[in-house]
Image (cartoon, rainbow, N blue to C red):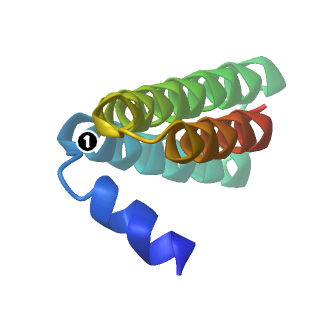
């Protein structure tokens, strides 16, 4: 039941820019695949792999930030200390998973 509740809380979070960036990453992955098929130089392949890794890390950070902002807005609106503590615990778990 918790997952449905979390989805509702973050339903307004838009990820338009992240989706665009992920589409670029897909293109980069296809490029690396082609490079490997063409037996391109290792340095060029590794450079592309690093760029992909960096782009994915950026997307991950932006997604986490957006959800953190939404969660903090929700925490501020909670009146009961117990409910706020539960939300903070959920955020702590989210950060553990992201690390």
Q: Position of residue 96 (x, y in %)?
A: 79, 37
Please give left or right for residue 71 compared with residue 50 in the image: left
Dividing the picture into quarters, in which one does residue 45 lie?
top right
The secondary structure type at the circle numbered 1 is helix
Q: Give the residue at x 76% y 44%.
A: 97
73 with respect to 44 (left or right): left
| Image point (61%, 35%), residue name | 88
Give the x, y percent position of residue 1. 53, 81
In the picture as drawn, the residue positioned furthest to the front comes out as 80
Left or right side of 46 for 4: left
In-front residue for pair 76/7: 76
| Count of marks, rendered view | 1
Which residue ends up furthest to the bottom in the rendered image? 1
The residue under the point 34% across, 36% down is: 21
Where in the figure is residue 60, as x and y percent of width and height?
54, 34
The residue where tag 1 is placed is 20
Residue at the spot x=62%, y=38% of the render? Answer: 85
Relative height, residue 53 to residue 4 (above, below):
above
Q: Nearer the viewer, residue 74 or 65?
A: 74
Q: Nearer the viewer, residue 30 or 94?
A: 94
Which one is nearer the viewer's eye here, 95 or 47?
95
Q: Position of residue 65 (x, y in %)?
A: 43, 26
The quarter of the displayed image where residue 92 is located: top right
84 w.r.t. 57: above or below: below
**Which quadrant is home to the C terminus?**
top right
How dense is the environment of label 1, judged by Cα within 10 Å: few (below 14), some, or many (20 and up)? few
Above or below residue 39? Residue 48 is above
């Amino acid at each position: 039941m918790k997952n449905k509740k979390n989805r509702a809380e973050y339903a307004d979070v838009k990820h338009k820019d992240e989706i665009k960036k992920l589409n670029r990453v897909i293109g980069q992955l296809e490029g690396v695949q082609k490079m490997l098929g063409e037996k391109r130089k290792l340095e060029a392949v590794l450079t592309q792999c690093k760029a992909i890794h960096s782009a994915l890390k950026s997307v991950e950070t932006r997604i986490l930030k957006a959800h953190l902002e939404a969660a903090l807005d929700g925490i501020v609106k909670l009146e009961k200390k117990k409910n706020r503590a539960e939300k903070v615990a959920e955020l702590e778990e989210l950060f553990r998973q992201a690390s």
